Amino acid sequence: MTVDHSAARRVLGLLDLTSLGEADTPARIHALCVAALGPYGHPAAVCVYPEHVVTARQALAGSGVKVATVVNFPDGGGDPARVERETRRAIAAGADEIDMVLAWRALQAGNAAGARAGVEACRAACGPGIALKLILETGELATPALIRAASDIGLDAGVDFLKTSTGKVPVNATLEAAEIMLTAIAERGGRCGFKAAGGIRTPDEAQTYIALAEDILGKGWVTPGHFRIGASSLFDAILADLGG
């Protein structure tokens, strides 16, 4: 019997395969990148800590898989100079994409300008050629009003993706937060992308986010240029599906 693996392959192509563990080593990151270049298709990107960007870039050379890294991570500090410095160093090391944590505590405290300053510093440091994903940390912002305000800060600054979470807090990606973010993106014309991250472990869970994005922005909108899923264990689940 022929098994239709198209859904799993689609999720794989939207994946930011992520390893942000404190015990990560160059050997572990190299092995992850080799696994990413397997026979079933490739993820959109591999996301690693800045100190592993060079290793990932070397391992993925010529594959078309992007190298993503994180800045202002995971705490979401309020120093724009730190954000700019970390961003420039990551790009110099070879990062194609930057996942930056919003200064969400500043926003919670009513200091939207302080939160905005870090995003603008990162956007300027990235320039036109580096994709910027803004991590809102929606589980900590918690309220629809703050999630929408954070989304608007990112959209105003011209980020390339709004991303739910770091994966380092108790509440990460939720469909409720995703709906707020995707609606904000749609109201601005759908130019900005969306990334669900944190706690998405199965292809079925990933499909719920894909379906939500398609419902709000249309089926043709969900491509690697507009839609990502940040995960680690999801990759193994996809490979299990495709190998079965």
Image: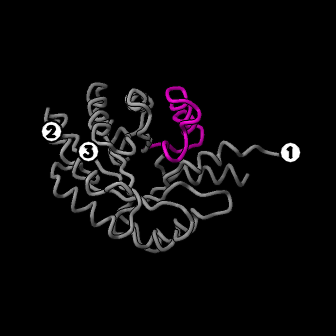
**Neighbour class for label 2 at 10 Å: few (<14), some, many (≥20)?**
few
Cα gap from disc 3 to disc 2, whole angstroms: 12 Å
Q: Secondary structure at mark 1?
A: loop
Q: Quick one: 223 or 165, which is closer to the camera?
A: 223
User: Which amino acid does the dot numbered 3 rest on?
Assistant: Leu
- Residue 229 in the image: x percent, y percent? 49, 45
User: Which amino acid does the dot numbered 2 rest on?
Assistant: Ala
Image point (26%, 57%), residue name? 125
Q: Which residue is mark 1?
A: 1
Callout 3–callout 2 Cβ contact below 8 Å: no
The image quarter in which residue 153 lies: top left
Callout 1–callout 2 Cβ contact below 8 Å: no
- Is residue 162 within the magenta segment? no
Specify start and end residues of the magenta stretch as a single range. Answer: 198-227
Mark nearer the N terminus (3 vs 2): 3
Image point (36%, 43%), residue name? 165
Q: Secondary structure at mark 3?
A: loop
Q: Is residue 217 left or right of residue 238?
A: left
Q: Which residue is mark 3?
A: 102
Q: Assign the magenta stretch its main secondary structure.
A: helix
How many numbered circles does the render carry? 3
Image point (49%, 26%), residue name? 216
- Residue 225 in the image: x percent, y percent? 50, 47
Residue extending furthest toward the right: 1
- Residue 178 in the image: x percent, y percent? 42, 32
Q: Is residue 7 left or right of residue 212?
A: right
Q: Which residue is mark 2?
A: 113
Residue 244 versus residue 108 in the image, above or below: below
Image point (38%, 66%), residue name? 23
